[in-house]
Amino acid sequence: MTSALEDALRRYQAGEYQGVIADYGVLAQEPDCPQALLVILAQCHLRTGSPLRAARHFRRAAETEGRDHAAFMLIAGHLFLEHLAVNEAFQAGLNARDLAPQDPRTHRFYYRALRHTCLFREIAEENDALMARLRGGDPFWRSAEDPYTHIDWADDEALAADLRLFPQDLPQQQKPLLSTEQTMLRIGYLLPSLTPESSPMRLIEPVLACHDASRIAFSLITLETETSPETRHPALAIGGINDDSASADIRALGLDILVDLAGHAPNGRQNLLAGGLATLTVGFLGVTGPSAGLNYDYVIADATVVPPEATRRYREKICRLPGVFAPLPPWTGEMEIRSRASLDLPEDAVVFAFFHEKRRLSPACFASLAAILKAEERAVLWLQFANRFSRDNLLAAMVEAGVAGERVRFSTPAASRAERMARLAAADVALDSFPHNGPAMIAEALQLGLPVVSMRTDAFWGRMTESLLDTLGLDELTVSDDAGYVDLAVSLARDAEKRQALSRKILGKVAGSSVFDPAFFARNLESAYGQMMMRARAGLPPEDIDPPPPVARTN
C-alpha cells in the first residue's frame, strides 16, 4: 500500500487526477484504505468537478485511523451543504461536533447545517439551548455561533453585536497613504462572486453601471479563483491565494474606500478586513450580516433600519442614506407568462409565495405559515426548495400541525431572475420571512404589483422590508407580531377585491418612486463616499453621517 500511496501522490502532484481515480478509486472501498490515499482521492474528485464524491472521501478520511478527523469531517460537511446534500451535511455536522466538542468551529457548522433541514422541533430546541448559553456570556459559545446565520432565527441586536468568528478583534494594520486627488475616488467592492445571478452582485451591478466616471474609479474584488471573461468591470480574483498575497494585491489598487459585500458570509475572508487595505472600510448593513468583528469604519444604513436610538449598538459610524439603504435592481426585462398548471399549482387556490432561502424559515415563521393554511382552507403555500430531505421534513411538520401535505407545493429554485419573476406573477400574495426579512424577494413581488405580508422585529434585519414599504408608502403591509402576520395574510386570502385594489396601489407607488432607480442610489452613495473621505482627508475620525441631501430622480 505504501508504493500505491507514493505513486498516487506523485501523479496527483503532476495533475493526473483522472488517472489516480481510475487506478486507485477502488481501494477507497477497502476497510483498511489509508487516510492519506482517501484525501488524495478526495482532492482528485474536487479537481475534476465531483464535489459530492470528494465530500464522501473526506468523510471516510475522518472515520479512518489517522489524524485531523474533525477537520476532514468539516470539509466534507461544507461540501455537502454547498451542493445541497443537506442530510449528509447535517450528519457530518453531528459527527464533527462529537469528534471535537471543544472546537467552536464544529458547533458553528452543526448549527448552520441543522437550520437547513426543516426539522423545526429540533431546531427550536437547539436554538433555545444556544440562546441560554449566549446570554450567559461564555466566550466559547459566542464564537461557536455563526454571526451570518444567527440573524435567521434571533432578533436580539445587542447580543448579535457580541458574536465573533475570532476570539479577539484582529489588530488593525497601517492604512495606505491618502490620495492627493480631491475629485476622483478609488473604490473597491469585495464580493463573494461576480456571477450576475449571485447575491449581492445582482443587487450592486446596476449601481456600478451608474457610477459617475468623472468622480469614481472602481474595481471589483472577488473571492472566486478567477474572473470571468464576461466581467464588464476591472476585477481582481483572490480566491485560492493566501492572505498575505491577497492583501498585497488589494493594496496595489490604491483604494480610498474598500466596500465589503462579503462580510460574515461563508468564505468571506473576514480576517483581510483588518489589514489596512484602504483608507476607509465600509459595509452594507444587511448584505453582510452583523458588522461585529469586521473592522468597518462605516456601515451603510438608513433611518429605519438604524434609528437614532439603535446607534449605540454599533462600534462603527452609521451612514444613513435617504430612502432605502440597499440597492434594489429594477425589473426591465421580459418574462414568459406561466400558467398555474405548468407550475403544478391549483387554479382555484389562493397561492402564497415564500421564495426565501430555507435557512430563513425559522421555527416561528414556519408556525405562522402553518397557521395561515389552517385558517384558510383555500390557501396553498409555494416554496422553492431543491433538497428532498428538507422538503420531506417540512411536509411532515405541516401534517403534524394539522395541514394536509397537498397544500404545500415546491419548485426548485429558479435559475434566472426572469424565471423567478414569472413564477411570482402566478402567485396571489408574497410572504416575507422573519425575524430575518427578505427585502430583495419582496421588492421583486412589489414590482409585479403583488400584495405582500411582512413583520418587523427589533433588530435591523427585521426592519429591512419595513424600510422598503415605508419608503413606498405601503406601511399597511408591515405588522408587528405573529398574530398580525397571520391575520393580514388570511384577510388578503379571503378578499380578492382587496388584493386587486392593493395591486393597483402598489404598481402606482412603484412607478412613482426612486426606490428602484439605480442612478438615484448611485448619486446618493457617491455623496456619502465623498463625505466620508472629506473627513479622512481633514484628519478627522469617522462620525455618523446624516442622510445626504436628496438628488433629483433620473428618468
Image (cartoon, grey):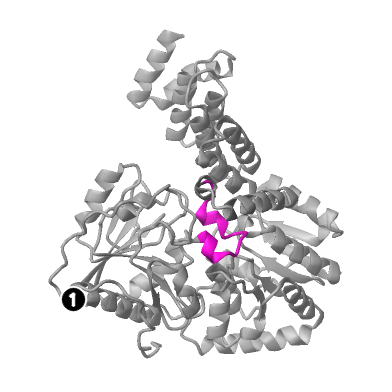
Is disc 1 placed on a helix, strand or loop? Answer: loop
Side of 236 relative to 505 (left or right): left
The image quadrant of residue 436 is bottom right
Residue 170 x %, y %: 34, 51
Q: Which residue is mark 1?
A: 538
Horizontal relation, residue 73 to residue 20: left or right: right
Q: Is residue 343 visible?
A: no
Residue in front for this viewpoint, 168 or 388: 168
Of 435 and 218, which appears nearest the observer?
Answer: 435
The residue most toward the left is 180
Name the kind of residue labelled 1 in the image: Ala
* Frontmost residue, 392 versus 302: 302
Closer to the camera in the image, 520 or 140: 140
Q: Which residues are magenta?
A: 144-160
Res 548 quadrant in image: bottom left
The answer to which image quadrant residue 101 occupies is top right
Q: Is residue 388 visible?
A: yes
Q: Quadrant of the C terminus?
A: bottom left
Q: Position of residue 534 (x, y in %)?
A: 22, 77
Q: Residues within 10 Å of mark 1 (few under 14, many from 20)?
A: few
Q: State yes or no: residue 152 in magenta.
A: yes
Whether residue 15 appears in magenta in the rendering, the answer is no
Q: Residue at x 28, y 48 (%)?
A: 246
Identity of the residue drawn at 56% across and 29% down: 59
| Picture coordinates of residue 95, whole percent (x, y) | 61, 33
Q: Which residue is depicted at the point 54% across and 65% down?
A: 157
Q: Is residue 271 above or below residue 216?
A: above
